[in-house]
Amino acid sequence: MTETRAVIFQAPGGPEVLKLVQRPVGDPGPGEVRTRHHACGLNHIDICQRSGVYPMPLPQVLGMQGAGVVKAVGQGVTHLATGDRMAYAATPPGAYCDVRVMSAAQVCRLPDGIDFRTAAAMVLQGLTVHYLFHRTVPLKSGDTVLFHAAAGGVGLIACQWARAMGIRLIGTAGTEEKCALARDHGAAETINYEREDFVVRVRELTEGRGVDVVMDSIGAATFERSLDCLRPVGMMISFGNASGKVPPFDLGILGAKGSLQLTRPTLFTHIARHEDCQAMAAQLFQMVESGKVAIRIGQEFALADVAEAHRRMEARATTGSSILLPWGGRPTAPPAGPCRQAGTGDSRNLPTGRAAFPRDHADRATAPIRLSSGESHLDLSA
């Protein structure tokens, strides 16, 4: 029986409810794999689940994406083999750990040209951009999109994806630095919503016409005014709740504002079928390997510092993607280089691009700590 560390919460609440525990991990059953993480993704949906915005059975391990190595394969799994490099975005949650057993359907073989940290930072966000640009509404070169939170993990990928497709992306962000970051990644124009009225500015930038599509992960704070940014028959894509859920809404307003269209998609509908997930991931990996999309890892945290990671994300004090590194100071520190120093409780901003580290070191660093049996709590303050 393998042992793993995992971050769980037993009741909804703030970052303080997150606890690091030791627990056993069994063998994979039919259609499952056992994976060892070298890096895990951090996403706003994790905060929604932890805080109770998205209720779920408890206790629960958080985390929807990770990257590492397949350690065992269950009966019937044919697209993966023991020893394969892998990455995934999948439900149910469970990625905040060293080792897990999970369904193999959404686990994808990772190309050698993409390192584990980059993969963990990009799969959920990149697949989100894929379905926004290719599966939700037909978009073509010359279209104009308003994208809120353009300097976040999803936003920076979207800026580059839009540039590659010839789409004019107008991005919003809350500081001049974040606006500059979005432009550096391909946004045609940016709007600092702390200094400008984004509706007025969008109308100026489009000569009064409005945009073809709004892509909004902010939710309650931006939803209704975003409708005023659309051209007649334009599409509003509401795909997140960073500021809270959109309140009950009178559909008649859509007609009054120009026969607008509205959808509330989720990634996990689009990747539910194994074939769709694998095809979308292959296209995402191709975009990254071709250089059309570069993944910016803005922050790295040790697994033991997950509460601080959530605080930073909730304060909107992050840019680009954020990841957890499972070594967490136990049993070994991360290799020297651009990574945060494990156990210090801080992180440093990292440059755009891929960051690699020796695979043999990463394997040792993520080896689970073995206790005698059962589940025990580990001190997150250590």
Image: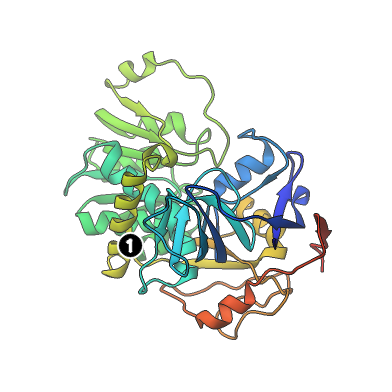
Residue 312's spot in the image, x, y percent? 64, 57
Q: On the image, which quarter does residue 317 sit in?
A: bottom right
The tally of labels here is 1
The figure's colour scheme reads rainbow
Position of residue 175 relative to residue 128, above or below, is below
Crowding near the residue tagged with mark 1, few <14, some 14–19, many ≥20 C-alpha atoms within 10 Å = many
Q: Is residue 177 visible?
A: no
Residue extending farthest front:
75
Q: On the image, which quarter does residue 135 sit in?
A: top left
**Residue depicted at 30% across the width and 58% down the height:** 282
In this orientation, which residue lies closer to the viewer: 198 or 135?
A: 135
Going by the numbered disc 1, the residue's amino acid type is Phe
**Residue depicted at 68% across the width and 40% down the height:** 51
Q: Relative to 239, is 338 on the left or the right? A: right
The residue where tag 1 is placed is 285
**Residue depicted at 44% across the width and 63% down the height:** 86
**Residue depicted at 72% across the width and 74% down the height:** 329
SS at badge 1? helix
Position of residue 178 relative to residue 144, above or below, is below
Residue 99's spot in the image, x, y percent? 62, 61
Residue 127's spot in the image, x, y percent? 38, 50
Q: Relative to 10, is 29 on the left or the right? A: left
Position of residue 3 relative to residue 101, above or below, is below
For the N terminus, the image quarter is bottom right
Residue 297's spot in the image, x, y percent? 49, 67
